[in-house]
Image (cartoon, rainbow, N blue to C red):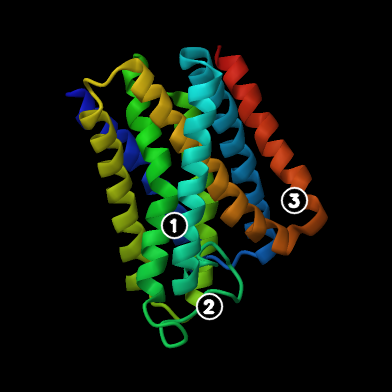
Amino acid sequence: MPLWAEAGCWGLLAGSALLIGAAAGWWLRISPQVIAGTVAFGAGVLISAMAFELVDRTERSVGLLPTVVGFVAGAVSYVAVNALLARRGAQHRKRSGPGQPSETQVQGSGAAIVVGSLLDGIPESVVLGLSLFEGGIGVAVLAAIFLSNIPEGLSSAVGMREAGRGAGYVFGMWGSVAVLTGVAALAGNLLLETASPVTVAVITAVAAGAILAMIADTMIPEAFARTHLLTGLITTSGFLIAFTLTRVEL
């Protein structure tokens, strides 16, 4: 199988976790506190992968300055686009309780939520595609993205249901996002196949900055809204478990 096709398959696998979470959120009646706890745990897992598998590895590869520049560029870009989408109704796209606007409340909010979800998932997918250049899929990154996507899909699906959106919309949206994350992983691998290691490393840093900004802007607020003082402890547990798994793997 060509490397770019393998990247697409891994991206699709990671994106499929969104559908798993959405199905759980749509058909199961899970308490808001449990949903928020899973989001906090997923955030911790993703922070661990971002810090050790992306930023640390990039710094060792190209040095501190390119890593810092790429990281800041990714974070600023994410925040700017996310602020624009928030004004169009996508601010609470991961919220499981009241907060997501219906289409009648904010015209075009459904489309903004779809674009916002893609904004959240594309940096992760690109990282997956790039990780294949290092001799194989980054297992820790793949596991972190998969595990964090489950609570993301779960929480958002519940919020969409509360906002009056139907099952066709919810599963159509997450199915589309899952496919497009696979395409993003494929495209990242294909377009950068001949790029220099420095270019790949800097783009990885950009993606890492966007991922951290996404966690802070969307996942942590959703978790804190329900788990309050336990958010830090749950997030820490996710971080430590993911970190331990990477060390055991080594």
Is the residue marked by circle 2 packed among few (<14), some (14-19), or many (20+) residues within 10 Å?
Answer: some
Query: Which residue occupies 48% across, 55% down?
Result: 80
* Side of 36 relative to 177 (left or right): right
Q: Secondary structure at mark 1?
A: helix
User: Is disc 2 in contact with disc 1, using a CB cutoff of under 8 Å?
Assistant: no
Q: Nearer the viewer, residue 69 or 113?
A: 69
Query: Which residue occupies 50% across, 65% down?
Result: 93
Q: Earlier in the sequence, mark 2 or mark 1?
A: 1
C-alpha separation, residue under disc 3 versus residue under disc 1: 26 Å
Is the residue marked by circle 1 packed among few (<14), some (14-19), or many (20+) residues within 10 Å?
Answer: few
> Which amino acid does the dot numbered 3 rest on?
Thr
* Side of 244 relative to 102 (left or right): right
The tag on residue 162 is: 2
> Which amino acid does the dot numbered 1 rest on?
Val
Q: Nearer the viewer, residue 160 or 55?
A: 55
Q: Earlier in the sequence, mark 2 or mark 3?
A: 2
Q: Which residue is mark 1?
A: 81
Query: Which residue occupies 38% across, 73% down?
Result: 110
Q: Earlier in the sequence, mark 3 or mark 1?
A: 1
C-alpha separation, residue under disc 2 versus residue under disc 3: 23 Å
Query: Which residue occupies 82% across, 54% down?
Result: 229
User: Is disc 2 in contact with disc 3, using a CB cutoff of under 8 Å?
Assistant: no
- Is the residue 11 above or below the residue 197 in the image? below
